[in-house]
Image (cartoon, rainbow, N blue to C red):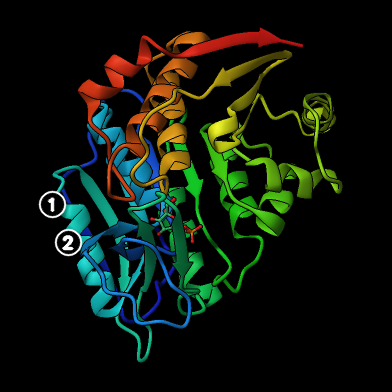
Amino acid sequence: MGGRLYSPHLQLSSFGKIERNGLVIFTVTLNPAVDKILFLGQFQKSRTNRLTRTLETIGGKGTHVFLNLKIMGVKSTALGIALGENGKKIVSMLGDCGEAVQILHYDLPGMESRTNYEIVEDSNHNCSMLTERGPILPRHITDDLLDQIRGLIKPGDMLVLTGDASNVEDTCIYSRLTAAANALGARVFLDASGHYLKEGLDSRPFLIKPNIEELSFIAGRDLTTEADILAAMQALDEFNIPMIAMTRGWIGSIIKNGRDFFKVNPIKVRAVNEAGCGDAFLSAMIAGTEKNMSILETLKLAAAVAAAAAECESTVGFDPARAEELKKQAEVVKIG
Ligand code: TA6
């Protein structure tokens, strides 16, 4: 793995082989988690709440894109950083899905990959995420990842950078990874928030997926009307980002593809768990790009996959047959 001496306590946890038949998609999860999903009727503050059931699955947005792509029959390779025993659990959950996994695992005193909790209220389908921060990742660890990525990426590949990075000492990690990937001829899909998104704009990602709060943060003002949103997306032209996917849950999404704007209306379904729908939407955008689908077909797929994901009780995954069905209801209109 490259020339530089890697950090001590590092073990490369790899499953499967990276198959190079054309481009490879690499998903990066800097801060993966074990998700514990807690179901109950209705949450009562300062009372004992009796859970009706619990579910444990893999957490972290990059791992979700990796699993969702697999469901869509699109191969990818999971990269990221895992720590301690919880990290080993995350790696084995990734390994179980039979795709290529090349996770950097560290056994360092007191450092364990995080656990996230989600409360799902069956009575009103409210979903509340409680995410741990996770241990602070020192620079030498993210430098290992940067070196690994420099050694793996080839022209035409795709690099997916998504999820929380607030536990990373190197606060420019996403823009450094983006610049490295661009220099090697890859396209970067960046789904980050706050400082990490703003900081990453300059490094010319191929696609960013801000939700309405994140776009308002970049614009420095509240975006209340459609015209506001279009103007804020247009204002990002200075960064030459080919595609901007602004998602707003059940209000629908607005996509800027080059000079064109599209509105993606949400598909009405009986939602069980809405966590992970954004990851599902992004996964479909990546699958559509990898398969050279038209922008209209890609956005219909994204709407359908996100809706199918909402029908599932887990934070990751969806029923592909159901997504195919829902695609027939997808409405995408060119606007602006
Ligand atoms: O989008 C769903 C999810 O990925 C959950 O699995 C949960 O782990 C959380 O979001 C993690 O998001 P974060 O932004 O903290 O990386």
Q: Quadrant of the C terminus?
A: top right
Q: Is residue 30 visible?
A: no
Q: Relative to 96, say whether 81 is above or below.
A: below
Return the residue at label 2: 92
Residue 158 sits in which quadrant? top left
| Callout 2: SS | helix
Give coordinates of residue 41: x percent, y percent.
32, 61
Mark 1 C-beta closer than 8 Å to ligand 1:
no
Q: Are marks 2 and 1 in contact (CB under 8 Å)?
A: yes
Residue 280 sits in which quadrant? top left
Q: Relative to 38, say whether 161 is above or below.
A: above
Name the residue at 83% across, 24% down. Answer: 227
In-front residue for pair 103/213: 213
Return the residue at label 1: 96
Q: Quadrant of the N terminus?
A: bottom left
Taking 335 as reference, is 84 left or right?
A: left
Q: Relative to 305, say whether 192 is above or below.
A: below
Give coordinates of residue 113: x percent, y percent.
36, 73
Residue 93 sits in which quadrant? bottom left
Q: Quadrant of ligand 1?
A: bottom left
Name the residue at 59% across, 45% down. Answer: 178
User: Which amino acid lies under the numbered mark 1 shown in the image of this protein?
Assistant: Asp
Report how far apart the C-alphas of labels 2 and 1 lie in the structure.
6 Å
Name the residue at 80% across, 36% down. Answer: 224
